Image (spheres, rainbow, N blue to C red):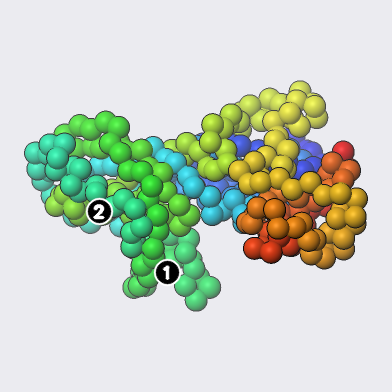
Amino acid sequence: MRRSFRDIHGILLLDKPLGLSSNQALQTARRLVGAAKGGHTGSLDPLATGLLPLCFGEATKLAGWLLGSRKAYEAEVRLGATTTTADLEGEVVETRPVPALDTAAIEAALAPLRGRIVQVPPAYSAIKQDGVPLYVKARRGETVDVPSREVEVYRLDVLERTTDTIRLHVECGSGTYVRSLAVDLGANLGCGAHLTALRRLWVEPFMAPAMITLDQLRAAAEAGPDPLDACLLPVAAGLAHVPRVDLDPEGTRVLGFGQPVPLGEGATPGRCGVWGADGRLMALGDVDGAGVLRVLRGLNLPSV
């Protein structure tokens, strides 16, 4: 169905289906919504399903801010084999027998993977080196030297296990690769492992997301603009986890020129959402220790 693009602003909590890349899912949703501008907040591999927040219009200015948010996943790990890609899409590199594992042995293997850890991302990843994604170099057969990085793993708990699989609940910060956690878990257990399934459950601030599938979005698009727009959250939903600052008319005027606004010593330092005197969301801002508000990303939303 051919659809004209329009200026629409909002956030779609898409339940990404299996097999699509994040960009394919974004472009499909953008065409259905008819949004002139769109972006996603952190990619999911084609193997992964679950929450992919999509930003349309002015909400795209918050996409980079949401990229660094805390995330939660449910992951299935297969023990006894390593693969080239660290998941089931790659070729098997090595197989080993899976030892008899009790709860204590698994916990001992998981413990070093929690907290602030150093992780080596998979060679088949979207991280760029000399402007080229690592997975492109790996597919060319080039030797890929993957730099390690510090990441944060807040929770890593066993949900269920069988003889050769472990299902995990993972909560982590930005830049964490669950595929690498699977590889490291297999190494700690001495039998190797790879990721066989991954579902993203939530991304801060969308902790209990009412996700929309592409089929639901198609049905809404066929029903008309009102059901379609009802699938979107307002741009302000992307700032639900930071303090709100409401400006008076003078502060609204000053901020409208991109200038700092003194809020006074009682202002809470840190990032915030900034609303003008007319009730319009104006910016993602930051308040310094002296109580001065500065714009990080200005938003050009229609008046309410």
Q: Quadrant of the C terminus?
A: top right
Q: Nearer the viewer, mark 1 or mark 2?
A: 2
Kind of residue sitting beneath label 2: Pro
Q: Quadrant of the N terminus?
A: top right
Could you tell me residue 30's position as x and y percent? Answer: 70, 43
Name the one closer to the observer, 299 or 210. 299
Q: Residues within 10 Å of mark 1 (few under 14, many from 20)?
A: some
Left or right of 34? Residue 252 is right
Could you tell me residue 152's position as x and y percent? Answer: 40, 54
User: Label 1, on which residue?
Assistant: 137
Q: What label sits on residue 112 in the rendered view?
A: 2
| Name of the residue lying farthest toward the front | 265
Q: Residue at x 31, y 50 (%)?
A: 114
Left or right of 90? Residue 250 is right
Mark closer to the chain start, 1 or 2: 2
Q: Residue at x 36, y 43 (%)?
A: 155
Q: Residue at x 43, y 66 (%)?
A: 134
| Name of the residue lying farthest toward the bottom | 130
- Determine if residue 116 is in view: yes
Give yes or no for contact between labels 1 and 2 (Cβ–Cβ under 8 Å). Answer: no
